[in-house]
Image (cartoon, rainbow, N blue to C red):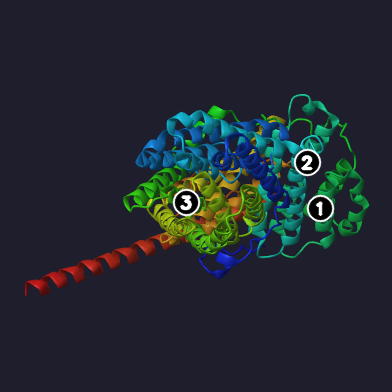
């Protein structure tokens, strides 16, 4: 029997989306670091260069918000690059400050370039927002071109403070980021085990895949020379391999079982998450004996429990001395800079349209504000940048409403503080406090973050360029509303269907990688080397994650999202087939098939891919019978049926649209005839 398909993901504009809290914890550590970095840099720059320079340094210190989860060795270099980006943004803003029209275009260019680089290099949030903010603030800071070196130096000072605060945990917990990523992966695996036999399986499967992929990325980034050859690093790599194998074994079980697993299995995975950093807390493998009693040794569940048990044996040791497993990951620490930038500019990449949408919209926001006579046009650009970071149209609408409503409340709070005419020290403390509170809640709900972010922005702006409080508050509200409107217009008008148009090709890509993996496993004449096996698993997992992410984005691109809705069963079937192919790559001695079966299977995959490219019904004959992999057969049949249904719905939609167009033409012709009479 086939596992139940989860409900299609939906993005909605409603009260829960606007004001409800997303799942997850509160970012206490990030909040504390943001407050410390802003307060310290603001104070230092104000003492050394004056209060206006302090506001610029405070924004420069927001390097602390980038690369929060990456290993410290990688983070040290990445944050230095972010700091250089801040300095470059300040220089651009200062040079463009002589002409407001040039400044508006410059801010848009910084927004587009920062979006491109952040996405291409996988820089952590908050993305281009603070690059735009430092560029905008520097464009109104006094001094003109002569002050460019001063402004750049102040931004560099702030960036250095942010770097130091972010790296403060390295001496005491040098491997905490990698340990946390592995622990998070084990926790997501526990959630996957609890989701077996439930309608949410496909969604939880995707989240678990994301966690496993992130663990792979961070452990790879942490494999520096010298540390890579230590027993501690070997233990971490061994746990990483067990995380991946457990995930694939859980996938096998989840797609074959319609009833929930015993709670003991999920609880065991939760305890493994604790044991990543604390080996003495590792669970006893004997605890799994009751749940696997009576199972056939080669059954799917027995294989899952065996891997959980063996992972516990590896986790209970503080070091890893067995060189037979886990010491080789067969990959570089990270892809080369040139490869990452080139792939982001390819025709199939979503980075290019996203960056162009951001740059054009932000520049147009600033130019429109100037044309309408707004004194602080740069706030319009900043607001547009903020709302466009949401992604698809529905999320942008939600974020725009949250930004506008939150600003209305935050302006009252910020104006009240400014009317008290607080001294500079109080302004610094309040700005740092509000920035910390913003980072505490921003991941849970952007509305509450906007309420707290607005007073911080008003305080720093009033220091950078003094302005009457009433006028500042009024202009802040108007600027935010206009920026939100322009951001929504950009999301609706510029490359809105970029995700939807790439979805069929991504499905084809998943099928192609699935075919390569299955044929490699089934071929009796070819032995898969460890390196080849690793590359197949890495590329297929990346394709599966990308497919689901693009579908989630495309489904929110209204009003034409209805064209992607019928593809949900196709996406699920393609993903399940891909995960089943991944699980076959984890088998130590997988059963093979005859060459005739391989040829027929290759033809079946080729026909499915061709039908998806051409958006037609697959002309699929009888599939070859894979006795040892029956669920792959099942998912391929379901995939063919789902594609047939999706094509029929597309044809029905096209026929309805043609009928409506004909009715409009008839109505227009009748109106013209009546007018002639």
Residue 270 position, x and y percent, is: 81, 54
Mark 3 touching mark 1, by CB under 8 A? no
> What label does residue 467 carry, if any?
3
Dot 3 or dot 2, earlier in sequence? 2
Residue 656 position, x and y percent, is: 34, 66
Res. 621 visible in picture:
no
- Vertically, is 668 above or below 450? below
> What label does residue 269 carry, if any?
1
- Position of the C terminus by quadrant: bottom left
Residue drawn at the location 80% of the way across and 34% of the way down: 171
Residue drawn at the location 74% of the way across and 49% of the way down: 184
Residue 315 position, x and y percent, is: 86, 43
- Vertically, is 218 above or below 426? above
Residue neighbourhood size for the residue with mark 2, other residues' Cα within 10 Å, grouped as few (<14), some (14–19), many (≥20): some
Dot 3 or dot 1, earlier in sequence? 1
The front one of 50 and 574 is 50
Residue farthest along the top direction in this orientation: 226
Res. 121 visible in picture:
yes
Residue neighbourhood size for the residue with mark 3, other residues' Cα within 10 Å, grouped as few (<14), some (14–19), many (≥20): few
Q: Secondary structure at mark 2?
A: helix
> What label does residue 176 carry, if any?
2
Q: Secondary structure at mark 1?
A: helix
Residue neighbourhood size for the residue with mark 1, other residues' Cα within 10 Å, grouped as few (<14), some (14–19), many (≥20): many
Q: Is residue 280 left or right of residue 547?
A: right
- Position of the N terminus by quadrant: bottom right
């Amino acid at each position: 029997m086939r596992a139940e398909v989860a409900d299609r993901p939906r993005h909605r504009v409603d009260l829960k989306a606007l004001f409800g809290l997303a799942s997850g914890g509160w970012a206490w550590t990030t909040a504390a670091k943001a407050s410390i970095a802003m307060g310290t840099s603001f104070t230092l720059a104000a003492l050394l260069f004056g209060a206006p320079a302090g506001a610029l340094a405070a924004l420069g210190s927001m390097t602390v918000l980038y690369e929060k989860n990456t290993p410290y060795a990688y983070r040290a270099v990445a944050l230095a690059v972010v700091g250089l980006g801040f300095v470059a943004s300040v220089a651009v803003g200062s040079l463009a400050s002589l002409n407001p029209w040039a400044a508006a275009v410059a801010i848009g260019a910084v927004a587009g370039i920062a979006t491109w680089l952040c996405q291409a290099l996988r820089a952590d949030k908050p993305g281009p927002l603070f690059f735009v903010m430092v560029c905008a603030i520097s464009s109104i800071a006094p001094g003109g071109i002569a002050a460019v070196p001063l402004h750049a130096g102040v931004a560099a000072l702030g960036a250095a403070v942010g770097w130091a605060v972010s790296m403060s945990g390295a001496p005491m917990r040098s491997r905490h980021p990698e340990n946390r990523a592995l622990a998070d992966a084990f926790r997501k695996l526990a959630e996957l085990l609890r989701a077996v036999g439930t309608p949410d399986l496909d969604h939880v499967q995707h989240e678990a895949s994301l966690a496993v992929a992130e663990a792979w990325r961070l452990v790879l980034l942490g494999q520096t020379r010298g540390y890579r050859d230590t027993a501690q690093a070997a233990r971490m790599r061994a746990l990483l391999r067990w995380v991946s194998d457990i995930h694939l074994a859980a996938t096998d079980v989840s797609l074959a079982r319609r009833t929930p697993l015993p709670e003991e299995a999920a609880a065991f995975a939760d305890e493994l998450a604790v044991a990543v950093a604390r080996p003495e807390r590792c669970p006893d493998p004997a605890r799994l004996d009751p749940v696997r009693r009576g199972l056939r040794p080669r059954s799917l569940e027995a294989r899952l429990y065996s891997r959980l048990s063996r992972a516990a044996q590896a986790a209970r040791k503080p070091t890893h001395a067995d060189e037979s497993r886990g010491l080789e990951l067969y990959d570089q620490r990270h892809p080369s800079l040139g490869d990452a930038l080139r792939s982001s500019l390819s025709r199939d990449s979503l980075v290019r349209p996203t960056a162009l949408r951001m740059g054009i919209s932000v520049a147009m926001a600033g130019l429109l504000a100037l044309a309408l006579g707004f004194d602080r046009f740069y706030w319009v650009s900043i607001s547009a940048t903020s709302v466009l970071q949401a992604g698809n149209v529905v999320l942008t609408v939600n974020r725009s409403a949250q930004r506008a409503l939150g600003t209305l409340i935050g302006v009252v709070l910020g104006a009240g503080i400014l009317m008290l005419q607080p001294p500079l020290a109080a302004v610094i403390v309040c700005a740092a406090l509000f920035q910390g509170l913003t980072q505490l809640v921003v991941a849970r709900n952007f509305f509450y973050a906007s309420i707290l972010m607005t007073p911080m922005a008003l305080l720093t702006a009033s220091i950078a360029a003094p302005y009457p409080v009433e006028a500042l508050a009024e202009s802040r509200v108007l600027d935010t509303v206009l920026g939100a409107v322009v951001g929504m217009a950009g999301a609706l008008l510029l490359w809105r269907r970029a995700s939807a148009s790439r979805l069929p090709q991504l499905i084809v890509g998943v099928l192609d990688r699935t075919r390569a993996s299955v044929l490699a496993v089934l071929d009796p004449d070819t032995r898969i080397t460890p390196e080849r096996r690793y590359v197949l698993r890495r590329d297929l997992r990346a394709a599966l994650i990308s497919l689901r992410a693009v579908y989630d984005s495309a489904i929110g691109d209204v009003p034409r999202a209805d064209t992607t809705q019928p593809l949900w069963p196709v996406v699920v079937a393609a993903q399940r087939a891909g995960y089943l192919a991944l699980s076959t790559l984890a088998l130590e001695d997988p059963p093979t098939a005859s060459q005739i079966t391989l040829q027929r299977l290759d033809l079946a995959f080729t026909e499915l891919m061709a039908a998806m490219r051409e958006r037609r019904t697959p002309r699929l004959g009888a599939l070859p019978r894979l006795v040892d992999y029956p669920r792959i057969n099942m998912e391929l049949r379901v995939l063919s049926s789902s594609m047939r249904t999706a094509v029929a719905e597309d044809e029905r939609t096209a026929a309805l649209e043609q009928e409506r167009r004909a009715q409009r033409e008839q109505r227009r012709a009748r109106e013209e005839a009546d007018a002639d009479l």
